[in-house]
Image (cartoon, rainbow, N blue to C red):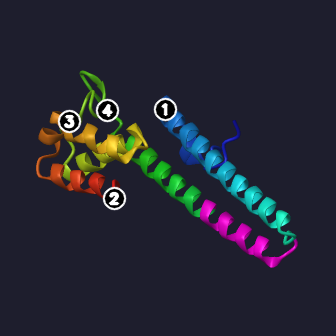
């Protein structure tokens, strides 16, 4: 797999852990999927315009540039998320007697509540892509209720907003 979502030869990425490397590979896979979907959309539009004898129209170029811009925005979101996750892992990737901190297996109680909120949100956003299943799983999570305190309802409301 060619890694081009970030520059892996940059000095700040020379001493990455296995977990951080896995994060980079996952982000690269997501980027590749976004670009593949964009190419499929462009091909579909081309075939529709070709069917209607409009393949040489400016509509094709305009729509292709819109699709490319949308794909680039999506890739930028994935890249920014990766950079934040790598930075977070560098700062808070320490361990306790139970191994590395991971929610829910080994939550980090040394974090303040906003940081806990981000960790639990990230965990549930990556568990599944189905918003309703995500909300139901979070609603049954007793550890999250105690771990997040007053932020529990905020995250519940956020996850519920994705179901609409």
Residue shown at 49% from the left, 48% from the top: 82
Q: Is residue 68 magenta?
A: yes
Residue on which the image places disc 2: 164
User: Considering the image in quadrants, where does the N terminus appear?
Assistant: top right
Whole-angstrom CA distance, mark 3 to mark 4, is 15 Å
Q: Quadrant of residue 125?
A: top left
Looking at the rendered structure, the secondary structure element under dot 1 is: loop
Q: Residue 141, which numbered label?
A: 3
Give left or right: position of 14 versus 84.
right
Whole-angstrom CA distance, mark 3 to mark 2, is 21 Å
Q: Is residue 69 magenta?
A: yes
| Crowd band around label 4 with a 10 angstrom C-alpha radius: few (<14), some (14–19), many (20+) | some
Which one is earlier in the sequence, the residue at label 3 or at label 4?
4
Residue on which the image places disc 4: 102
Which residues, given as a range, are shown in magenta? 56-71
Question: Nearer the observer, disc 4 or disc 2?
Answer: 2
Question: Nearer the observer, disc 1 or disc 2?
Answer: 2
Q: Residue 17, which numbered label?
A: 1
Vertical placement of residue 57 versus 32, above or below? below
Residue shown at 31% from the left, 47% from the top: 121
Q: Quadrant of residue 70?
A: bottom right
Whole-angstrom CA distance, mark 1 to mark 2, is 38 Å
Which one is earlier in the sequence, the residue at label 1 or at label 2?
1
The x, y position of residue 53, in whole percent, is 87, 70
């Amino acid at each position: 797999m060619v890694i081009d979502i970030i520059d892996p030869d940059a000095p700040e990425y020379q001493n990455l852990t296995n977990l951080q490397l896995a994060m980079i590979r996952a982000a690269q896979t997501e980027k590749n999927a976004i670009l593949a979907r964009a190419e499929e959309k462009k091909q579909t539009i081309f075939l529709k315009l070709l069917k209607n004898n409009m393949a040489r129209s400016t509509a094709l170029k305009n729509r292709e540039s819109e699709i490319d811009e949308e794909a680039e925005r999506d890739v930028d979101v994935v890249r920014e998320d990766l950079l934040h996750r790598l930075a977070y892992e560098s700062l808070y990737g320490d361990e306790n007697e139970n191994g590395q901190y991971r929610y829910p297996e080994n939550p980090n109680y040394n974090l303040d509540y906003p940081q806990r909120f981000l960790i639990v949100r990230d965990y549930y956003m990556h568990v599944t892509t189905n918003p309703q299943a995500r909300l139901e799983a979070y609603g049954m999570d007793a550890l999250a209720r105690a771990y997040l305190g007053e932020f529990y309802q905020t995250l519940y409301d956020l996850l519920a907003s994705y179901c609409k």
